[in-house]
Amino acid sequence: MELSKAGFKGKFRISASKNVRYLFLIGLIIVVSTFFTFINPKFLSLVNIGILLRSISVLFLLSMGMTFVIITGGVDLSVGSNVAFAGAVGVLTLQATGNPVIAAIVTIAAGAAIGFINGYFVGKLDLSPFMITLATMALARGLSLVLYKADAISVTNEAFLWLGKTSVGPFPIVIVFDILVFLFIKSLLNRHTFGRDVFAVGSNLKAAHLLGRNVNMVLIKVYVLTGVMAGISSIITIGRVSSGQPWAGLNLEFDAITAVVMGGTSMAGGEGSLVGTIIGVIFYGIIINGLILTGANPYFQSVAKGLILLIVVVLDQVQKNRSAE
Amino acid sequence: MIKTNRILIALIMCIAIVTGMAFANGQQEAAMAADGDTLDIVFINDGHVAPYHVAWLGGFEDAIKAYNKEFGGITGHWLSAEGSLEKMIQQAEATINQDPDVMFVNAINTKAFEPLVKKAQDQGIIWIAVHSPMESADYSFTLGDVTNGYNQGLALGAYYNGEANVAIMLGQAGNPSGEARREGILKGLAEYPGVKVIAEQPADWDTVKAQSIAENWYTQFPELDAISGVTDAYLYPSIAIAENRGIEDVTFWGYDGDIPILEEMKAGKVGCDILLSGTREGWAFVQTAYKVTHGMKVDKVIDFYTPPVMTEEVYAMVKANGFPSDIEVYMVDKALEVAEKGYLEFGPDSVK
């Protein structure tokens, strides 16, 4: 009885701490949005909200995949390059077949293939996720340059471009797609055995193994999922710019990691939430968009972004210290 | 706990100060733009990593101030995409929503921006494609990269009287401007069958990458005579490493007209440079924006005048070895003057 009371209290404390974090981030979103609107009233215009949503749509998908990886205690540095690689495979398939459905499937499969390589080396061979994904980051970017012959390829197939290009009024259709993906992924993480395994692997790898979880397979699935997200992201990117681009996705991995950490997912693994990631992505997107719209000096933009991340990380530590006390 | 709280408060104060400073600039410009007859110019650049970029953006800012002082109501700011296509697209979309009068866009890849050019034009914004021409853009501001590269290659070949081992440092793979410069340099060198290109390597416009490439070349190719670069940014580390290693018989051939590199020419290390000059180009942008919004005649493709620069000694030598005398060459002192003082060619007086 006492034990269950303590368990309840502990759970309540974690949940309360998570809520405080969300409230803090939402509060920050409100404050900075008000500030940006004060400087430039166009910030809250429907057109700008549409631009903001479109600009975060790819980061949103990549960050969802990255949340899974980070919960397992890993990191995936290859996602940005994978966006370019999967796009190259997809665009060339489209050129060869003229069939947008086949091209889309191949694009996602190409992304998943890089994910599988990551997952196999991290899961089966127990190699460092940082080193492996650093290697595949270079590999995927290099392959993309080779496949594209370092030059962009124009895409005119309207069906293939549809997801990234179409808007209803100022609102991009891709956001509806992102929400559907989110609902699916969230149920996978929170209501499915796979999700519990992901948390178990991140909390204590050895314990998860002893409890009979197939740790290797969980890690492979997590990295494949992230690769799939990169594949979908490349379809969106191609639609957005009506072309396949060899340098697409450059440095997006760092934006995704930033958004995930801002959202409260612990780099140590075993802890994190997709709702937090969404709030992190929105907050990050608002900062970038607002700084552009207000004509802030670019020298200060990086400083402001860095400070915001620092503040969130420090806040995270403060909360953890309080919980520990 | 008290300690972490203090750190948190300190960080919040830092962020308040930094954002305050950043926005003071933006607000001032917004207030100015709200007044009657105005000209608002935005320059979106692909990155901000090389000394050329610093000079470029500095020249742009100085020109905005000078034109505003002279004519009033002229505002402008620049953005850097830090090499990220996604960031650049977001910046272009947000800028279009801001409704400036003129946008200069140095696109990472022009094909990605075709949809946005139309969107900007539908809103009455003048789109000026920078360095890589775009058919759909209202204007293209070009450098004549192939011709410039050709002149550099030609001068190099003539300097060595048609017998040399050359290594070329390239731009980012697929970047149209870098590819055009490479094409020109190779064409120029090809005029001399005795000139061998023993290495070609992209350094992605990055001085740090250029450093490691130069180090490898000096070790790998003891027979190396000259390093040709598609940007002056590569020459800084290449010259420094050569000096540190006591290598004296390698010459350097640049492209950009950076003031420190022009000064190096006097020391005899740099054979030829191409006079772009970031400062000059920044001033030229504001002059162009002023012209196109004030009904003055401007060609759809604006070919920025970029002559080769040499010392008198080098020029005499290359001319004696067949460098064509109909190619106008600036001597270093003249090049330094126009590179430093962008207003001489492109200041408010030039549009009166």
Image: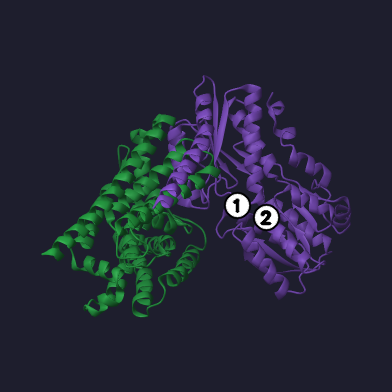
- Percent x, y for residue A19? 26, 49
What's the residue at 76%, 60% (across, down)? B252
Q: Which residue is more in the foreground, A24 or B96?
A: A24
Residue B231 in view: no
Q: Image quadrant for the N terminus of chain A?
A: bottom left
What's the residue at 39%, 46% (across, down)? A285
Amino acid type of the residue that numbered disc 2 sits on in the rendered structure: Ala
Q: Is residue A69 above or below residue A30?
A: below
Q: How is the image coloured?
A: by chain
- Percent x, y for residue B343? 72, 33
What's the residue at 35%, 34% (across, down)? A44
CB under 8 Å between callouts 1 and 2? yes
Q: Is residue B179 left or right of residue A54?
A: right
Q: Is residue B24 above or below residue B190?
A: above
What's the residue at 35%, 33% (across, down)? A45
Q: Tell me the element at label 1.
A: loop
Task: Write down the chain letter for disc 2.
Answer: B
Which sits earlier in the primary sequence, circle 1 or circle 2?
1
- Percent x, y for residue B344? 75, 33
The tag on residue B343 is none
How many neighbours does mark 1 have within 10 angstroms: few (below 14), some (14-19), or many (20 or more)? Answer: some
- Residue A108 in which image quadrant: bottom left
Q: Is residue B331 left or right of residue A278?
A: right
Q: Is residue B329 left or right of residue B131?
A: right
Q: Which chain is green?
A: A
Amino acid type of the residue that numbered disc 1 sits on in the rendered structure: Val
Q: Distance of mark 1 from mark 2, alpha carbons?
A: 9 Å
Q: Is residue B70 above or below residue A94?
A: above
Q: Which residue is more in the foreground, A184 or B155?
A: A184
Mark 1 = which residue?
B49
Mark 2 = which residue?
B233
Q: Tell me the element at label 2.
A: helix
